[in-house]
Amino acid sequence: MLFRQLFDPQSGTYTYLLADTDAGEAVLIDPVYEQARRDSALLNELGLKLLYSIETHVHADHVTGGWLLRQGTGSAFCLSAAGGAEGVDRPLNNGDKIEFGSRYLTVRSTPGHTSGCITLVLDTEKMAFTGDCLLIRGCGRTDFQGGDAGEMYQSIHTQIFTLPDDCLLYPGHDYRGLTTTSVGEEKAFNPRLGGQLSQSDFVGFMNNLGLDHPKKMAIAVPANLKCGRPENDDIPEDEPSWANLTYTFAGIWEVQPHWLEENLSAAQILDVREADEFDGPLGRIPGATLIPLGEVAERAGELDKSRPIVAVCRAGGRSAQATVILRKAGFSDVANLAGGMLRWRAQNCAVEGGRD
């Protein structure tokens, strides 16, 4: 069996590829919309046919790539029947088996983070994919989308902790660079669930987390309740070849800081901040041209349509809007700098001006 653990740095989401290489059949667990091109490229390179994209739950922090992958590969979209989404090809229930070649995943219902969470267990019970139910030394939150702390405690103890201690657990997210754990480790060391901690201990802990809602929740949940299907069934255009770009669910092409730093001569750098920011503490990208966002439409003629443009601002919001304005003005090769100057500085890329 082939296994790959893939990562989306924007949302901290793990996507898992499992395949029977003899049969050439594969499944993807929790694909991310912005990474659908990456996933498709990997499937093509490995000569695999994607049978299913499987969601462990309706996500609140990113949009699934399931619909986009279905359009490109003919794969079926799978989600818990309790998830309540429309357009699901295969609603899943406890005990269902998802087969690929001679291998299969068994569905275990593990509600608590949301009412429709599932854990997927490999046929050998040597690997399980827990979504946002059980994380590495943690667990998913339980304060929205039908979450219930008591239900999560029972799900983990009856459906995950009953697997063999050496069963490797692969979570839906991790924000510290951790990749995997095991049933035995989590039973012993999980600070929320391990050792002698009782259900009342767990519920008291979870009911007092006081977390803000995920930033993308207002976009992600409605989209995921439609299997990631965008308005008007808009399929992203073919990827431009002038840079290593990713396409966001908002319809924005983005470039990462390190690629741009290594290829500064490949594009015009358009800084759409205000003048005091351009000369301020964050500094500016070497060679950048300043045109504040409010002036971009009027001054677009100052830019060269024959050269690609990368727009930049403080955090990536204003510059994303600048790319929309420029496309309406007839510029074809336009991208946004992901994370703006904040990420540029955080990744120690070169700047003019500014201060530490």
Image (cartoon, grey):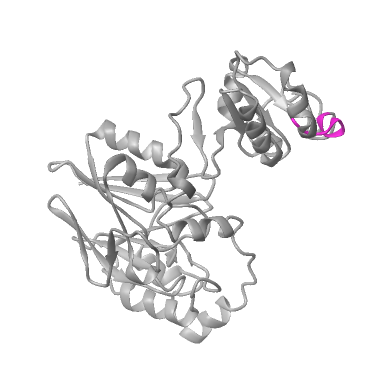
Say which of 325 and 25 sits in front.
325
Residue most extreme to the bottom: 200
Q: Position of residue 44 (x, y in %)?
A: 27, 33
Q: Write the start and end of the magenta stretch as one range.
A: 272-278
Residue reaching furthest to the right: 276
Q: Residue at x 28, y 31 (%)?
A: 45
Instruction: Tell me where residue 23 sits by quadrant.
Output: top left
Viewer can see residue 332: yes
The answer to whether residue 166 is visible is no
Q: x%, y% of residue 125?
A: 23, 63
Instruction: Give yes or no for residue 276 being in the magenta stretch.
Output: yes
Relative to 230, residue 340 above or below: above
User: Horizontally, is 200 left or right of 1 in the view?
Assistant: right
Tally of numbered tags: 0
Image location (x, y in percent) of residue 155: 37, 76
Let me know if residue 271 is in the magenta part: no
Q: In the shown orientation, is residue 239 left or right of residue 182?
A: right
Q: Quadrant of the C terminus?
A: top right
Residue at image point 29% right, 62% down: 120
In screen coordinates, is 261 left or right of 38?
Answer: right
- Kindly give the residue lying farthest to the front in the view shown: 232
Quadrant in the rendering for residue 235: top left
- Expressed as whole percent of the image width and height from the top left, the position of residue 40 reads 33, 37
Residue 194 versus residue 354 in the image, above or below: below
